[in-house]
Image: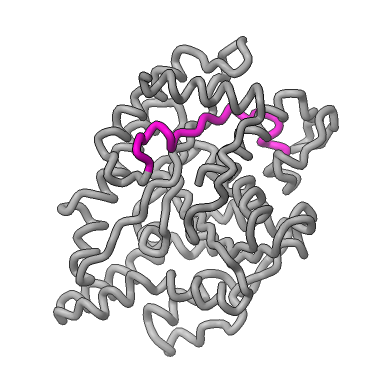
């Protein structure tokens, strides 16, 4: 079967019949990562965190300096402890303080939706992560100049160590990381900490280019990620758990049928994935593709009100930025798409 036809038929089965793979989470740690902003990553991260926490207790880490995920999970809060409080002393030593003994916050204390899930904890983001890459790469260059692969590995796996320790303390079974739309600093460390990566790809030209760049960075021995892996004595790349095509079908008038422009971008993404099939653990990379709609008002409500899409009630009204928005019947379709994504990763 042609890859595009396979993806479209699977999507129709998800939308029409509520199909899920029923496999459960295959990896312990995931990073949601894309090198392009405006693709719906924050909405996806919040909703996937909720779907994952239905299956297992999880630790969520916000590695994006914009802190959108932190704001959604901890609305109106100003957390004193952030990911930077752990990363700086881990990378730079005790002169920058001690690593906090308690790095995370229980999500259900600030986001009511998580009161019905397994335990979920958040290590909040910090806007100062924008300046973090220069500090990190300075330390890596020093370790590399000393020809010390063990020290390089220790730096690259600093985030992994922090998350593993916090999981042990909180008895969390899984990890989900949200990253910035830039390959540097926190995103680099998240790739080193993740067993698998989930890549959102919007149906537009820049996102298709970003997908190819991301997959090339993950695999090309001459690009930065793999160069540092080799300097660390050899490290494996994370697997690709899913390619999530976002904002698909906004111009289609037929249920479960993406518009022609969306189909074209999905097909181009499939061609790129095929070039990097060694990064997937699916026999066919097309099996890693998930189509999600333009969540429109439901997505805005979800983020603004800290309510996962799967918990939105069809027909309900919500005030968002002075506008009265209604959850329409299409939310059921979005709920099924998100449930399917959580079932294949």
Viewed as shown, does residue 19 lie left or right of 26?
Answer: right
Outermost residue to the right: 316
Residue 4: quadrant of the picture: top left
Q: Position of residue 106 (x, y in %)?
A: 70, 67
**Rendering coords of residue 177 (x, y %):** 51, 58
Q: Is residue 27 left or right of residue 44?
A: left
Residue drawn at 67 percent across, 63 percent down: 120
Residue at the spot x=30%, y=56% of the render? 237
Residue at 55% x, 15% y: name it.
257
Does the magenta run of residues contain 299? Answer: yes
Residue 84 is covered by the magenta coloring = no
Question: Considering only vertical position in the picture, is 131 above or below 303?
Answer: below
What residue range appears in magenta?
Answer: 282-301
In the rendered image, which quarter is residue 14 located in?
top right
* Along the viewing direction, whichever of 341 and 96 lies nearer the viewer: 341
- Residue sitting nearer the eye, 289 or 111: 289
The quadrant of the rendering that contains the N terminus is: top left
Image position, residue 293 (x, y; %): 58, 27
């Amino acid at each position: 079967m042609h890859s595009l036809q396979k993806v479209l038929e699977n999507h129709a089965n998800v939308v029409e019949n509520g199909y899920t793979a029923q496999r459960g989470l295959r990896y312990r740690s995931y990073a949601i990562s894309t090198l392009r902003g405006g693709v719906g990553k924050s909405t996806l991260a919040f909703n996937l965190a909720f779907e994952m926490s239905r299956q297992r207790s999880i630790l969520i880490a916000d590695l994006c300096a914009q802190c959108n995920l932190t704001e959604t999970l901890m609305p109106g809060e100003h957390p004193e402890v952030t990911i930077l409080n752990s990363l700086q002393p881990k990378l730079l030593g005790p002169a920058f303080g001690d690593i906090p003994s308690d790095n995370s916050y229980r999500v259900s204390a600030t986001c009511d939706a998580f009161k019905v899930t397994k335990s979920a904890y958040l290590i909040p983001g910090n806007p100062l992560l924008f300046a973090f890459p220069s500090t990190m790469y300075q330390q890596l260059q020093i370790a590399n100049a000393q020809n010390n692969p063990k020290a390089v590995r220790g730096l690259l796996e600093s985030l992994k160590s922090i998350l593993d320790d916090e999981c042990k303390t909180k008895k969390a079974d899984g990890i989900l990381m949200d990253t910035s739309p830039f390959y540097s600093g926190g995103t680099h460390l998240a790739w080193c900490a993740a067993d698998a990566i989930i890549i959102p790809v919007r149906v537009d030209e820049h996102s298709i280019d970003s997908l190819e760049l991301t997959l090339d960075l993950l695999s090309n021995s001459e690009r930065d990620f793999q160069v540092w892996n080799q300097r660390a004595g050899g490290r494996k790349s994370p697997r690709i758990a899913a390619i999530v095509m976002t904002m698909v079908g906004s111009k289609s008038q037929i249920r479960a049928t993406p518009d022609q422009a969306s189909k074209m971008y999905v097909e181009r993404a499939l061609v790129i994935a095929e070039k990097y099939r060694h990064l997937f653990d699916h026999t066919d990379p097309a099996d890693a593709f998930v189509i999600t709609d333009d969540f429109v008002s439901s997505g805005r409500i979800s983020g603004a009100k800290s309510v996962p899409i799967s918990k939105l009630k069809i027909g309900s009204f919500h005030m968002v930025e002075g506008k009265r928005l209604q959850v329409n019947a299409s939310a059921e379709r979005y709920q099924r798409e998100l449930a399917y994504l959580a079932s294949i990763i």
